[in-house]
Image: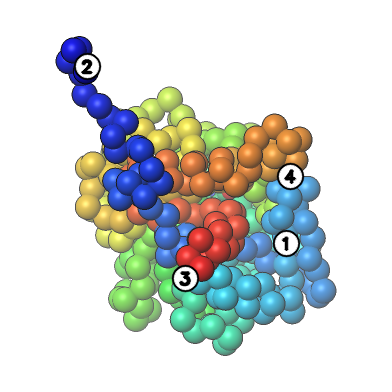
Amino acid sequence: MNTLEFKRHRRLRKTAAIRSMVRETHLHTEDFIYPIFIVEGENQKNEVPSMPGVFQISLDLLKSELDEIVALGIKAVILFGVPNESDKDECGTGAFHDHGIVQLATKEVKKHYPELLVVADTCLCEYTDHGHCGIVENGTVLNDESLELLVKTAVSQAEAGADIIAPSNMMDGFVVAIRKGLDEAGFIDIPIMSYAVKYSSAFYGPFRDAANSAPQFGDRKTYQMDPANRMEALREAESDIEEGADFLIVKPALSYMDIIRDVKNHFNAPIVAYNVSGEYAMIKAAAANGWIDERSIILEMLTSMKRAGADLIITYFAKDVAGWLQDTKQ
Ligand code: PBG
């Protein structure tokens, strides 16, 4: 007989069955948005060195990638363009070209899989020769002038068939500008998934290899947020909601779980966590060395993001997890 007074929490952990009954957070394939890098050219499938298992794919090979994604039950992809260096210019005009790489890729997805949701990342850094996310004058990224180009990009993505517009360049007013631009072009039903809370983060390093989008001078600190700030995240999210955002993205995710929770507690919109390239690379590197159990760590990390408040997760692990979820259902 136990004479001490204490609670027996272990009662609810006794068997796998009881643990599964009291489990509070679950991963579903519908939670995931899978990023795809589309590269110019033909017959290209180039593995990104810092992101094993992630490829830059040319348009002609996109279909077989889509077959796999759809078979796994994934509902949405986010597209990033990797144009030729020679097609880049000061203003990033490739971002809103009718035959731009993302516009063509969007049409390709819609041709084969009209039900698969295409999220278009709306930014200029992959298309500018200086690698910044807007127009640069005297070393400064101009806000209002860059908005015009961003609106053009969003409208051209919508015209190509994108289902969701995800502006990521962190210019002030980008949500209201894009909302107005989409509405005027007749796209009142296309939602905006705003990168509302996007930190200036070293965790984007491998992505910039994948997308060839590193800034050629300086950094992104005058437009992306300081990792030290929390109240600022709420101000950013509040503006975007007021301006008409339908989803709020918090990015990166792993080091920003507190921010995900804050944003979830303050706003009623669906919250999206972006499990970014550096978070992916760290796990892949440690797993390749045999230092961690890759599958367990991935599942723990993504579950923690949902527990923190994410409704959806943009992740390079989407295909892996969708496969594991299919296996456990059988
Ligand atoms: C475009 C953009 C970036 C990422 C998504 N959209 C790069 C950046 O802001 O430098 C990063 C995604 C990742 O690291 O996985 N601006």
- Label 4 residue near ligand 1, CB within 8 Å: no
> Decide: marks 4, 3 in contact (CB < 8 A)?
no
Could you say which disc has been placed on residue 56 in the image?
A: 1
Which residue carries the number 3 mark?
A: 75
Q: CA distance from mark 4 to mark 3?
A: 26 Å
| Sequence order check, earlier mark of 1 and 3 | 1
Q: CA distance from mark 1 to mark 3?
A: 20 Å
* Kind of element beneath mark 1: strand
Mark 3 crowd level (few <14, some 14–19, many ≥20, 10 Å Cα)? some
Q: CA distance from mark 1 to mark 2?
A: 62 Å
| Sequence order check, earlier mark of 2 and 4 | 2
Mark 4 crowd level (few <14, some 14–19, many ≥20, 10 Å Cα)? some
Q: Nearer the viewer, residue 19 or 256?
A: 19
| Sequence order check, earlier mark of 1 and 2 | 2
Q: Position of residue 103 (x, y in %)?
A: 58, 75
Apparent side of residue 205 relative to residue 177 in the rendered image (left or right): right
Could you say which disc has been placed on residue 2 in the image?
A: 2
